[in-house]
């Protein structure tokens, strides 16, 4: 029997990943980098991969995965405000 998670359930899991928790904790600094155009997703992905920081459902972060996680974290913080 296979279980299919709803999008809300998957997002909840994703938002509790090491990567999402790190992004939440460092949201102010990351927001400033992003606003200045200084946030390099490619470089950040390499750093997280070397550090063994996992995203979502246990995947090593890619630039696209970082951006998706950033969007989810930012949306979650806005919704909680």
Image (cartoon, rainbow, N blue to C red):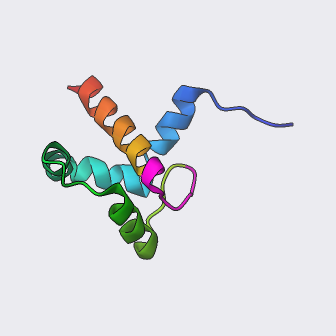
Q: What is the quadrant of residue 22 in the picture? A: bottom left
Percent across and percent down for residue 38 are: 18, 55
Looking at the picture, how far across and down is residue 74, in whole percent? 29, 36
Residues drawn in magenta: 57-65
| Residue that extends furthest to the front in the rendered view of this protein | 37
In-front residue for pair 3/37: 37
Looking at the image, residue 49 lies above or below residue 67: below
Quick one: 69 or 22, which is closer to the camera? 69
Toward the right, the furthest residue is: 1
Residue lying at 55% horizontally and 32% vertically, measured from the top left: 9
Residues 65 and 42: in front is 42
Q: Is residue 5 left or right of residue 10?
A: right
**Residue 59: x percent and y percent?**
56, 58
The quadrant the N terminus occupies is top right
Does the segment drawn in magenta span residue 19? no
Q: Which residue appears at 38% of the width and 60% of the height?
A: 42
In the picture, residue 71 is in which quadrant?
top left
Residue at 28% x, 24% y is 79
* Above or below 48: residue 62: above
Name above or below for residue 53 compared with residue 56. Answer: below
* Residue 69: quadrant of the picture: top left
Q: Considering only vertical position in the picture, is 9 above or below 23?
A: above
Q: Position of residue 46 (x, y in %)?
A: 41, 69
Q: Main secondary structure of the magenta part?
A: loop
Q: Is residue 43 left or right of residue 38?
A: right
């Amino acid at each position: 029997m296979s279980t299919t998670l709803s999008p809300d359930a998957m997002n909840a899991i994703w938002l509790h990943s090491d990567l999402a928790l790190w992004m939440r904790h460092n949201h102010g600094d990351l927001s400033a980098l992003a606003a200045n155009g200084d946030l390099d997703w490619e470089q950040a992905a390499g750093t997280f991969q070397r550090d063994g920081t996992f995203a979502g459902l246990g995947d090593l972060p890619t630039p696209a995965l970082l951006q998706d996680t950033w969007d989810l974290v930012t949306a979650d913080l806005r919704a909680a405000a």
